[in-house]
Structure formats: structure tokens, C-alpha cells
Amino acid sequence: MQQSAGQPSRDAARLVVEHVEPSVDGGRFPVKRVVGDVVQASAVIFADGHEQLAAELRWRAIDEDAWFAARMTQGENDRWEGEFALARMGRHEFVVQAWLDRFGGFQRDFGKKVDAGVDQPVDRAEGMEMVRKAAARSKGDLGKQLKNQLAAMESADADAATEWLRSDGLRRLMDEADDRSHALTSAPQPVDAERVEAGFSSWYEIFPRSMTPNPERHGTFADVVDHLPRIRAMGFDTLYFPPIHPIGTANRKGPNNTLTPEEGDPGSPYAIGSPEGGHDAIHPELGTFEDFDRLVKAAADHGLEIALDFAIQASPDHPWLKEHPGWFAWLPDGSMKYAENPPKKYQDIVNVDFYGPDAVPGLWEALRDVILLWVEHGVKTFRVDNPHTKPLPFWEWMIGDVRARHPEVIFLSEAFTRPTMMYQLAKVGFSQSYTYFTWRDRKQELIDYITELTSEAPKDFYRPHFFVNTPDINPFFLQTGGRPAHRIRAVLAATLSGLWGVYSGFELCDATPLGAGKEEYLDSEKYEIRVRDWNAPGNIIDDVTRLNRLRRANPALQTHLNTRFYVAHDDNVIWYGKPAPSADGTLREMIMVMVNMDPHGAHACDYEVPLWEFGLHDQAAIDVEDLVHGHRFQWHGKIQHIHLAPDEPYRIWRLTRGGEGA
Amino acid sequence: MQQSAGQPSRDAARLVVEHVEPSVDGGRFPVKRVVGDVVQASAVIFADGHEQLAAELRWRAIDEDAWFAARMTQGENDRWEGEFALARMGRHEFVVQAWLDRFGGFQRDFGKKVDAGVDQPVDRAEGMEMVRKAAARSKGDLGKQLKNQLAAMESADADAATEWLRSDGLRRLMDEADDRSHALTSAPQPVDAERVEAGFSSWYEIFPRSMTPNPERHGTFADVVDHLPRIRAMGFDTLYFPPIHPIGTANRKGPNNTLTPEEGDPGSPYAIGSPEGGHDAIHPELGTFEDFDRLVKAAADHGLEIALDFAIQASPDHPWLKEHPGWFAWLPDGSMKYAENPPKKYQDIVNVDFYGPDAVPGLWEALRDVILLWVEHGVKTFRVDNPHTKPLPFWEWMIGDVRARHPEVIFLSEAFTRPTMMYQLAKVGFSQSYTYFTWRDRKQELIDYITELTSEAPKDFYRPHFFVNTPDINPFFLQTGGRPAHRIRAVLAATLSGLWGVYSGFELCDATPLGAGKEEYLDSEKYEIRVRDWNAPGNIIDDVTRLNRLRRANPALQTHLNTRFYVAHDDNVIWYGKPAPSADGTLREMIMVMVNMDPHGAHACDYEVPLWEFGLHDQAAIDVEDLVHGHRFQWHGKIQHIHLAPDEPYRIWRLTRGGEGA
């Protein structure tokens, strides 16, 4: 014997509404969009028999009671489509409702019979009976209109009654009066409308203490202000700092991650916390809160926002160890393990225990309050260090709580781990994510990776932030490829994704490794103050500036989602297009990028100009603008040829379908 | 402001358990299997940090309280795997439970330290503390064993304590005592274990009234008994009848679907119901319930089971119209529309209204009771006519209710409509389904169709029943292709799917259409009694008999799910293999089928023998048995050549990896 099937029920769903899109895990997590986006929604809808269906898309901001609604239209097979615009920031939700459109089905069938001349009086009687019932259940003006319509039809001759029964006017009244037989509503699908910078921004990372002009003196926030014009001139809009909090002295690291610091070594800013304070304090040598506020203001005046690091870990000197021992996991002998992220060892850091005896809600709320404190000081963007080693429910709660108060706040996940976890962190709330881009330096693997991000499930919740380097990652490609390699990676990051990031020094092509086979920088700023010559010869500041300028000027370059790869007949030459958005969906303009991914050698090949995307035949001409050098010309025909030497490893063109010649 | 994120909670799931397989819509509908199947289950499981995870597969028959459980093993990336056997019929369910394996993680890390010689006394103390806590929370014998173990370790020297801490014995005790930190259990996934015939059977369809030897006399159940030896000799195991109920006289159809019957025309058996009864009665000219019971018994003695048609519709003479007017939808003038399945018109039939005023539960239960009545008379298989024009919730309830009482009952869905609906009917309970096979007569479209059914979502819930013809469908391919076409379709249906069906007359290559461009049979048995010469020359009884014999003898031919297509260099020659099941997953034997799908011309081509599937190199030899003619030989090398003429359009071979020569 199996489970009882229960009783028959009139209420069991008769229709099927499935494959609602966009959706992340069936509505468990929000779909990510930015303000101004139009959400293209769809669902597969069907029912038994041959009755006519109707469907409606309903949406609202989560803090409003009223729903907007618009009829969906039937597309291919059983897929219905609709759309709505996200007019403001914050959490929204939508549902799809479907029902049996009884009067619509009557009009459809009655119309066919009338047109074929086989309609019977009983058909009209059936329609009028529907109007009678609708009038009876409708109140006010609508009920009155339906009653009047009915009276008119009853006293009219057959032809006039038939016309009325088929009319759009009656259709609209009946829609309004419809009791939506067998209506079924999908689960609500949350959608987060974030500010534009969640999807499009250009980051520059500095260690504030290195901004000193004098290597003997610790840099300050005031020193950073002096660098703002330089950074803004390169076109960046987000200026990101590693932790700016007091640094512990216990097990302080010396230069190059040594365990034997000398007097005066500044230590790693990731060893957060000293008797002078923890995550809610500022390292005294950088300045005061007043200095920080001045910097935030000055940055804003330059069109830059400050992003802070949020690294949940403590120096053994962090005040929390004494104030809140129940937030940490102690060993039986009263000691504590230092942090590890194998194979890396962080002897100057201990981790909190998110499930320690006093940790919930004490620690969780304290961490949330750290974020809120910095938000009050004008920080709206946080880069989170190693979030994959902290519990997912903490992130979901904390980010949800902060964004419920401040929907403009953006969190960037710095998780380099397995894809399942990287994607899950994005699902639970991170607006942006570090990626494998840093190590994808071969043509096919980069194509495969972008294709996964743009065409599979992540497209609706995972925004890839393409960093070309970080203080922790000095990629072998940059170490060994010199200036051409830096230019190659810059153009790829800046044109493939709406989000790209540069750790300062990259633009100077500084890629000296800690040692052979090491992916870290020599004399890393994590452990010492470094003063650089920001105009050092051989820099690629011109490339970076040009790329950021093109990104600002061309919406096509402000997202990864529109990337389309085309055929270039060389395994080193990558060739892709980014269509400009157009209101009617017709492609008129596309930014095209071609890169020789080999920093050591020239490559020449034929490639295909995607004339077909513009509706052009293979021999047609198309207008081309070279966005690097500025000149304009035409290509004639689909097959063209290119030669790319390492000293000019990329091209960026704008293709426009001209008025003539097409 | 957005939705509040609520309070931090220790109970929010810390682990992620997702992509549980097999699963139909996340557990909303059962996965379909048959008794004896081993269910291969898996899930993606992960958590923050570097802790060790453990996972368990738990399953039970739904009517049992106790769960079976077995540890899962970690496969590629974050996918964990397990399996369980379905030992008996009925609904089962399984879940995946995962948790942080704290002691396992300790043993892993402690072992590494000991092996590297860097373990500290505090590491042992940490392990012993875990044992102490486990002992404290464990009762009875387990608690005692843990306490003894702890006492022994505490009084032992460091080396001995270390050995104990690393031992499998302690591991097993600690597993048993584990409080499964942060345990998370997936949603239950239902699995239906049906009898073997749900997935493997060979159907033969007859109109009992045509089994008369004398065209002047209406055939009876007793006449059918006389045909059982002939049918069984062809190897069929399911004998299916269109409706056997009293036939109405109102608007009775004449021969060839005419609206002008003459005295003595028997009418369509689908016009169910007359003053002599409805779905719970037998057409008097066929016999009595006693005759029917005798037939069921005689069929069983021949290894045949009887399948009945379940057509939910009524002749205007059906007793229900008077007894239960609230089960029907009446027009305003008191008349009722006749049934349509556009473009087909059924003037002799009216439909019930499943949501009529008295229909729920009255009509639904009455229909369920019709099934239960026939089950009591030994019918365990029902072919359901046009289920897509009846509500899905009715089917889900009715089939669930019947199968809860009689899990051996099989329902076959005869829905020819859009794929969404055909698949949904299978989800809500139909064990088997009619398919598009009947119209897939070109090589690539057949490959595409089988690939969809075997590799996409339907594989877990949709069992395709390949009918070569039906009383409603006389495919153009058979009409125009003669005897070769019949042989081609027979071999394709019988070897591609575990379920195939023949409407009698097919084996005689009777395919005369109603008219040019019509897909119906001339002089259809639906409207008249037809007496055939069952040994008519040109029949393909030998083919049918051989195919059914091979299907019985070879489990490889009892499912569609194992079908693998290979390369044959001709667009008319289809070439596929069906591996024999093997306990260890190693392929040792494969049934291979090659068919020239062109009934009008010979085709010759090279083809690839899939030596690589057997782990053989491209020049190796493999043993071949011709399963049509019986002789044995060897192929040497991957590329072979074939010539297939219409008079011998197919080959069936058994490939076996021999002991030598491999």
C-alpha cells in the first residue's frame, strides 16, 4: 500500500505555470539587476483541453502593497512573455498569474463560426449568458455597463448582437469582470535593483600608507587626497583600500611575509586590532575619523568613491579577544589556532567562531554594526576578504540586513575556491565576485569561461569582477610577459566585463615575483611601505586611461552579458563583439575587440566580420571606426585579415551599419 | 527600505545540499523505476571553510517508518554519490543528509601532523576532548565503550594515545555518537517502483468483435480465446482492447466515420453507454462478466494480460446523463456540445464536465470506481484515451488513489499534443506514454528524439511506448512503403524502446488508407467488424516473432535509456547499440542494430564498430553473432561496410569482447 492520495479537490491547480524566468533557484534567492533595467520575464503555461488561456505579469517593490500588472503574450509553444522596468533601487518581486480565459475562448470560437457562417442562436445565447453572469457578480460602474450592454444585445437583432459579442469593447469589460477561472499564481521571484555601480565600475586599489612621498614617513589619508587627481585622470571611479584599522603587534610579519620583523616594520594591515581598537577604529598613523571623512568628501568631489576591505579576523591583540572570549574557539590549553588558508599561513591572525557560545547574535550583530559604522562615514562599497571561510547564513543575514537599511551598499566577494561556493556566495547576497579570470590566459579557456558566465545559471546572480592583479596575485602571465602582457590583460578585463580592477603598480608593469614559481609580489605592500614612481617609463597609463574612457562612453562595454565571440583563425587571437543596446532589439552598432593573447610573438590570421548580425550579406560593406587611433574606414566582405605584433597587441573598433552600401 | 532580514539564527542552514538526483521537479513528482532497479543517487554538497563533510543516503518504502541509511562517497568536485535497490513494488522516498564531520576532520588533520612529525600535545588533547564530549552525550553500551576508550588513552603514553586517536575503531564509535553538527536534510524525493511491465512489455491491439470467424456474426470474448495461441506465438505479452462497453445509438457512426449508419452497423466502441449500461458494463454482444473473467484467466494461462481502454466520454445514451446531469456542461438551450479533438469531430460522443456542479467528488470518484471494478476483474493495465483533454489534478488524484490500493496497476497515456503536456501527464502519474515515434521516420529526427528522451529531464519520468500504428494512425510511411516499411518500423520500435505496440493488421502489412492524404485506415474497425486472413501472404509475422523473442532474451533490449548512436555514413542508415547491463559497469556485450530507413532503395555505406566502448583499439577484432540468421564471425577493425536492400532492411548483431584477440 502506498500513501493515500487524499480526496478529490476543486482547488488543486488545474493549470501549469513552470520555468518562470528570470529565477534563481525557483525564487529562493534574488535575481540581480540594476536600476533602469527592464526585466524580461517569461513562463511556460498550459492546461488540459483546448480552452484559451490568459496570463498576467505582476510586480512591485517589496515595500509597497500595490502590484503593477500587465498582460503577457504567448510566444513559441507554451512560453508566455512580459516585461517590467525597475524604476528605483531595492528589492522587488514578480509573479506570473495564469487562468482560463473563458470569454476570450468564446470570442475565438464564436468568431470562427460566424466567419464560416455556421453560428447558431445557441452560440449567441452562450455568450450572453457569460455576460449576464459577469454583470451579476460586478459592482458599481462596471456592473452597470455590463447590464446595459446585455440589455442592448437582448433587444438588438441577431447581426447587431453578434457584432457586440465579438467587440473589443465587450472584451475589455469582460476582462475586468473576469473571475479568472482556475487562476494559478507562481511563487514570487525576488529581484534586486541595485545602483548602476553594482554592475559597472572600474576599481583601483592602493595601500594608503604607501601614498607618502617620503619612504621614511607612514602615509596618511591626507597623502591619499594628493593622489586623487592622478587616479581619476586614469578614469577609475572606485578607490579601494585594504584594511585601515589598527595593526596588532603579536606575531607581526616582517617584509616579504617573514616571521622576524624589525623595529619599525608596519605589519600586515590584515592583522586587525590592537589596544588602539579593532574593526571600528582607524590605524592612528593613517589619521583620524575626521581625516577619513575629509578624504571621502575629496574623493567624491573627484568622482571617486572609497571602497573598504572587510576582513573578519583578528590580531591576537584585537580587543574582542578579551571583551568577548565567547566569540572565539579556544583550544583545551587556552590557546588559539592561528588562521590558515592552505597553503597560506597567517600566524599574525586568529579567526572568530561564528557559532561560539556568545556568537549568535552578539558577534554577528557586532560585525553588521562595523559595516553600518563605515556606511555612516560614507563608504558604500565593501570588498570582503575570504567570505567562503565564513558561514553562508551569516552573509545572507548580514548583507540582507544592511541592504534593507541601505540598498545602495555593494559587497564584493573575494572568494577563490570551487565554483559551487563562489556561486552560492553570490546567491546569498554579494553583488560582485572575484573570478578565475586572473588565471584564464588562453583563448579557448577564456571563451569557455565567459560563455558559462553569460549563458548558464550564473548570468542572473553572479557579476564577475575582473581584477588583472591583486596584492596576493601576481599572475605568471604578467611576470613573464612584460609590458605586452599587461596591455593584453588590461584590454581583456576592461572590455569583457562591466567590472574591472587594477591593483596599483600594474599600470607601471611592476610584476617582480617573490621568487621563481611564486605567484606573489616581491617586497609586497602587505608587509611594508612602498613608494613608487608613478610616471616610471614603460608604464601603460595611456592604455588604462583609454580603456576607462571607452567604457564610460559606450554602454556596450558596461556588462559581460552581451559578449559574443567570433571566428579568428589563430589560437592566440581572440575576437569578440559587444552590441550596443537598442530599444527595438535591432543591432545597429557593435564594439569589436581583437587581442593577440601571446605577449611574446606576432600573429596574423583571417577573421570573420559578423556582417550577418547586422542583416548584411557576406560581400557587404560596413563602417568601421578605430577607437584607439580614431580613424574611420570600411570593411568590404566578411573575411578580413589582421597582423597583431606584441607592441600593438589589440584593436578596438566600432562597427556601424551605414545608410548606404548595406 | 527593503524587507527586514530578521534576526541572526544558529539554525539557518550552514551547509548546502542541492542538485539532488534523480529528482522530478525537486521532489514534486515521483521518479519512475521498476522493482529490482538500483537507484543511483547523488547531490552537490558543500559548506564554508575547510571542515570535513559527511553525507548519508536514507531511503524507505513510504508505508514504513524506518529508514535505511548508507554513507555517500565524494566524487568529482562537490558531488556525493550513493545507491539503493528497490526491493518491492510501491512508492519509496529518499533524502540526502549532510553534516560537518568534526571527528573525521580531526583525524584527517591530526594524521597529517603526526605523519609530518609536527603534532603537539594540544592536538591530542583536542581529540580527547571530542571523545569526552561524545561519551558524555552517549547512553548505554556506546557511552560505556567511549568512556573506556578515553580512560585507556588518558593512562597511555603519547604514542599509544596517538594510535588510538587515529584508529578506525574509534572512528566508528565516534560516528555512532556523532551529534551531526549543522546537519541538513534534503527535501524527500519520491520514487515509484512499478512492476517490470511498466517499463518492458510488447502490446498487441485487437477489436474483440472482429475476432469472429464469421463476418455475419459479432465476435465475442470466447472468440478472442481462440486467438490467444496465435498472439502469444508472436511473443506479445499484453493484449489491448478498445472499449468493450455498451455502444450508444444516438448519432451512431456508420462505416468509414459516416454519419448515415444502416441497420446492423455496430457503431464506434468509443460511443460509450446505452440503456444497457456505461463504463461499468459490457457490450452484450461481446459476452457477460463471466465470459470476460474466463478470457482474462485464459489469457493469463498463455502469459498474456488484458489491457483495457479508459475513454472518459459518453454517448448521449449513457445512463450518467440522466442520473447525474450535474456531471455535464449543458448549453443554455438544454442541449450539449458533442466532442471535438480538432480537426476530428465525434458527433456520437459528449464530454463530462470535471468541474460541473456535482462533479467533485461525485464524477471523479465514479471514474475511479470504474477502474477499481475492472481491476477486480483482473485488468491491471489501462490505456487512457486523450488524457490531455481532462484535468491534470484529476489524473494525479485518480492514479494516485488507484495505485495506493493496487501498485501493480499501469496507466498508458494516449496524448498526442505538445511536449509540455505529454510530459506533465507522465509526471502526474502515467507509467507509459504514447510518443511522436509514429511520425519520426527520418534518421536524424529519430536520433534527436531518442537523445531527448534518454538524456534530458524526461528520462526519469517519461516511458515512451512506441506504437508502430493505431486504429487512428495509419502512418504515411507504412501506406507508401509496403512490406519493407513495416519491417523497418517494427525493428525500430522493438529495439529502441522497452515498450512497443502493434495494432493488429500491421503484421499483415495492411495499410490501405481511407483516401489520399488521409492518415486513417480504410474500412476502419472503429466503425465496422473486420475479419482478416491472419496468414495472408506477405505478412511479417516472422519478423515480429523474432523481435519479441530477442527482446525477451536480452535485457539490453528492454529499455530505451541505454541507446547509443554510432556513425554510419549514409543519411538513411541508422546504427545504434544497446549495452547489456553488467554488475561492475564494464561493457562486455552490446546488441547492435542497423536499419536502412529507406523502404524504396538499397543503401551501402561504411560504419564505425564501437570497439572503443569495449576498450579495444581501432584494429582489434571483436566477436559478432548475427541474431537474425544465427551465424558467428569476427570483425577486424573499426571501419566496416554494409549493403542493405529493402528486402532485408535490418541487421541485429550481438558484439562480445572475446577472451583472445582483444
Image (cartoon, coloured by chain):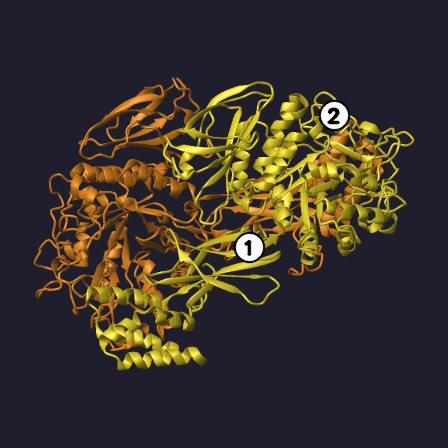
Chain colours: A orange, B yellow
Name the kind of residue labelled 1 in the image.
Gly
Does residue B107 lie above or below A114 as drawn? below
Q: Which mark is residue B536?
A: 2
Q: For mark 2, does the 10 Å Cα neighbourhood hold few (<14), some (14 to 19), or many (20 or more) residues?
A: few
Residue A496 location, x and y as percent? 32, 39
Q: Is residue A441 left or right of residue A135?
A: left
Q: Is residue B156 left or right of residue A26?
A: left
Q: Which mark is residue B27?
A: 1
Quadrant of the rendered image containing residue A387: bottom left
Q: Which mark is residue A84?
A: none
Q: Nearer the viewer, mark 2 or mark 1?
A: 2
Q: For mark 1, does the 10 Å Cα neighbourhood hold few (<14), some (14 to 19), or many (20 or more) residues?
A: many
Q: Mark 2 falls within which chain?
A: B
Residue at x-position 41% and y-position 21%: A659
Quadrant placement of the N terminus of chain A: bottom right
Name the kind of residue labelled 2 in the image.
Ala
